Structures are given as C-alpha cells and as structure tokens.
C-alpha cells in the first residue's frame, strides 16, 4: 500500500485540512488526521489543486528530439503542476495515423511524469487538402478525441465542415488554429503601430477573427464541437461571446503569454518574443483577461513550443515562432488573474484542470483527469505555495529548449509537489 498524508493544505485555496492519499486515490479529507503508515508532507497552508491539464503542448517527438522529447517535455509539465497534456500533431512524421499517435501515447506512459493524450492531425501531413484517418486514430489505443492541424489553419471551409461532421461519430472536437493564410503572407508580428514603426509585415487581427466567425457558423450548422486554439484578439473574444450566446458548442483557450505580454516587446528584435499568433496590444490583453474571467474563454493552454537553439537564436525574420510555457503557466495565471482579483483558486482549477479535461474528454474512463478534490477521486494533484516567489531561469528548466520569454522575471505561486494517481512526480519543487 502506497500512502501519503498531506498535512495542512488548502483545497482550492479554502479552509486548511489534511488529505490522505492511499493507492492512487484520495482516501480521507479532514482535520487532525493521524500520520498513519505513509509519508507525511507538511503543506504549511499551501493551495491544493487538481492536477493541471494542458490542451495544447508541443512535445516534438518523433522527429525533433533536439528541441524536446516526450520525456523532457512531460517532466517540465510535472514541474509546472500538470498531470496530463495533449501532444500536438506537428511532429515528423505527422501524427495523422493510428501508428504515430499510439507511439506518442506509449512514450508518455514509459516516461511516467504525466499522462499524454495525443492530438491527431485533421489533414494528411497537415497539408490542408485530404482529411486524415480520424476514425482509426479515435479507435486506437491512444483514444484520440482532439484533432488539430495547429501551426496551420484548416482554411478550406468544405474540408473543415466535413471534419466537424466526421468527429461527431465519436464525440471528438476540432481544435482550429485560426489564421486566414492569405491575410498573413510574410507576417512577422501583430499588425499595428509597432509593426509600422519597425517595418515588419503585420499579422492583422481580422485574419484570426474571420476564421473564428466562419467556424462558429460551421459548427452550429452541423451541430458539432469546435475548439479555438490560442485566442489573441479583443475581436475574437467578442465573436466567441456572440457564439456562446447562441448556445453553440464552441470552446476556446488563451495562452499565458497572451495574458501578459504585448507587441511592444518586438521593439527589441529579440526573437524569443516571436510567436504565432503574435503578441498583441494592451487592449487585446485586457480583453483576453476579461474573457477568461467571465468564462467566454474556457481555459488556459500553454502552447508550449520548444525550439532548438539554431531555430530561435537567429535574426527575427528567420527565427521560428514559439515559446516554452509548461513550467511558467501557473505562475503567469496567478500573476495576471489571481493577484489582480479576477479569478479565485477554485476558478483557476476550473480553467486549468476540469474544463480542459472535459473538452479533451479526459474526465472519464479508467484513468480520468480533471476530477474534483474529494474522497474516492484519483489523486491527481498539485500543491502550490502562492506566497513563494521564484525567478525564471532558462538554464534550470527541465525542457530541452530555452526559449522562454519570461527569463529573469519573478513569478508567484511556486509548485511544491505534483502527484500522478497518488505517486509523487515532483516533491519540494524538484523531480521526485
């Protein structure tokens, strides 16, 4: 029997209790629980949350193990408080067949740091022309339920409609990278005053918003599930609010970096700030925070995008877009949403655990994620010290890549421990 007693912890940031974990489940919750036979961990009033679930992680394996592997990426996830991640399909080979998604799924099980749910490609090779084998990926051992060509937009409206119709058979969801390609040819950053001053080709907000509007209408027309990846503009928030007001089955995510950073950072020409969709204006940042607070945006997803040194440390135009984010996500959400009074810790748990698990259909089955902190539930948990600050050091990250835009920044909410089905993957902020 494996047993842990978490002494003096505050589930969802509320009243302090003791929580006993036995054989992978929450066995007792109360005050003054005896130590028992297991190990005792003094929480000292830290916040206890359900294990975080990320809907949008790039693990790069197979094909780009120089940038990240399932082993290194999931260890970074555990250090960030995550017990499950969805691995995006833009690997090499692309995760567009049952064989590739099962390979990624098995690599996650072997690594053991967190559960890995592969995301299947919508189209063959991410080419946007022929629909991939969605049904066989759904029926595979990986049990794929989320499909995305992320990094590319499914810009063909007819193909997008057919994909939305197809996934209804197994309760799947299409996660769209909303970017009208003809409006973003050569785009390097957000279209606005700063792009004009720097002479860089702009990425207009309407390129995102036009696809979101189209796909909300398509999802409603065929009565299917649409998820919008990495929402970045104020106009997108308004469109999502409109679609939800209609009762349509549309969900959306925002990244931590879009909740904090603005396109003014491009003035440095440091490609660590180059990302797709690009950093936007302060007006957009404010709208995204409001949308996350009022539920228009359903969840936070990291869009963890590790890159090898040579792909990122180049001149701006040649550098690949993307930022790492698994280890810093909770700290950024605490900084922008909790410390500003926009979200409670219980609401953070909803937006970073239960809701993404529900969207990705990880909330049921033999090993569910995103479940509440309650007796009998799986012990997928993270313990967070909201009063403890820490400084982001790219050299200390578990990720194989170093392209974090938060280097040197002090963040709140240090992850003290992470438990995957009652087994510690992180203790005292270090790999267990």
Image (cartoon, rainbow, N blue to C red):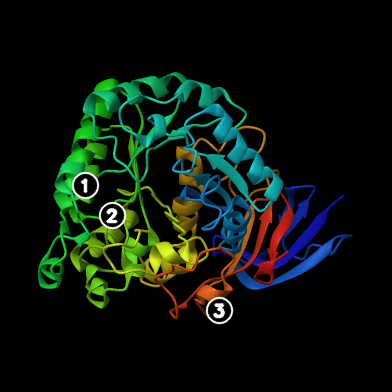
Q: Which numbered dot is residue 388?
A: 3
Q: Residue furthest right?
A: 37
Q: Is residue 220 above or below residue 199?
A: above
Work out which quarter of the rendered image holds the C terminus and state it: bottom right
Residue 413 screen position, x and y as percent: 52, 72
* Of pointers 1 and 3, the one earlier in the residue sequence: 1
Q: Which numbered dot is residue 208?
A: 1
Give the CA distance from mark 2 to mark 1.
Answer: 8 Å
Confirm whether residue 352 shows in the render: yes
Front-most of residues 372 and 312 = 312
Kindly indicate whether the residue at mark 3 contacts the one at mark 2 (C-beta within 8 angstroms): no
Residue 345 screen position, x and y as percent: 48, 62
Kindly indicate whether the residue at mark 1 contacts the one at mark 2 (C-beta within 8 angstroms): yes
Residue 77 screen position, x and y as percent: 57, 58
Front-most of residues 58 and 353 = 58
Of discs 2 and 3, which sits in the foreground?
Answer: 2
Give the CA distance from mark 2 to mark 3.
Answer: 31 Å
* Of pointers 2 and 3, the one earlier in the residue sequence: 2
Q: Which numbered dot is residue 25?
A: none
Instruction: Return the residue at label 2.
Output: 277
Front-most of residues 389 and 176 = 176
Residue at x 77%, y 66% (from the top left corner): 32
């Amino acid at each position: 029997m494996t047993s842990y007693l978490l002494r003096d912890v505050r589930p969802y940031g509320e009243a302090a209790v003791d929580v006993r974990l036995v054989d992978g489940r929450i066995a007792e919750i109360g005050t003054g629980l005896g130590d028992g036979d297991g190990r005792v961990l003094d929480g000292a009033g830290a916040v206890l949350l359900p294990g975080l679930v990320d809907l949008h992680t790039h693990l790069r394996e197979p094909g780009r193990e120089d940038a990240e592997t399932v082993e290194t990426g999931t260890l970074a996830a555990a250090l960030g408080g995550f017990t499950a991640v969805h691995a995006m399909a833009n690997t090499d080979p692309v995760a567009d067949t049952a064989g590739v998604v099962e390979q990624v799924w098995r690599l996650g099980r072997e690594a053991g740091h967190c559960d890995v749910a592969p995301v299947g490609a919508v189209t063959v090779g991410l080419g946007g022309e022929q629909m991939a084998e969605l049904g066989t990926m759904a029926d595979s051992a990986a049990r794929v339920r989320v499909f995305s060509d992320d990094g590319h937009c499914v810009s063909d409206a007819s193909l997008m409609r057919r994909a939305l119709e197809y996934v209804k058979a197994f309760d799947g969801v299409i996660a769209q990278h909303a970017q009208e390609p003809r409006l973003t040819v050569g785009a390097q950053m957000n279209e606005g005053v700063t792009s004009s001053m720097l002479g860089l080709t702009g990425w207009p907000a309407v390129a995102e918003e036009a696809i979101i509007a189209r796909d909300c209408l398509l999802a409603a027309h065929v009565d299917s599930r649409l998820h919008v990846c990495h929402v970045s503009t104020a106009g997108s928030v308004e469109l999502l609010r409109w679609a939800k007001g209609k009762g349509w089955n549309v969900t959306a995510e925002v990244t931590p970096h879009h909740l904090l950073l603005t396109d003014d950072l491009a003035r440095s020409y440091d490609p660590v700030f180059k990302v797709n969709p690009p950093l936007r204006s302060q007006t957009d940042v404010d709208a995204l925070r409001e949308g996350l607070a009022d539920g228009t945006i359903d969840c936070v997803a990291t869009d963890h995008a590790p890159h090898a040194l040579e792909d990122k440390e180049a001149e701006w135009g040649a550098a690949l877009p993307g930022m790492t984010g698994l280890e810093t996500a909770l700290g950024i959400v605490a900084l922008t949403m909790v410390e500003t009074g926009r979200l409670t810790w219980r609401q953070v748990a909803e937006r970073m655990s239960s809701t993404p698990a529900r969207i990705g259909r990880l909330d049921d089955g033999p090993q569910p994620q995103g479940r509440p902190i309650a007796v009998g539930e799986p012990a997928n948990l993270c313990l967070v010290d909201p009063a403890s600050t820490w400084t982001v050091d790219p050299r200390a990250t578990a990720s194989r890549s170093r392209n974090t835009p938060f280097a040197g920044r002090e963040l709140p909410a240090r992850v003290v421990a992470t438990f995957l089905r009652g087994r510690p993957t992180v203790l005292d902020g270090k790999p267990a």
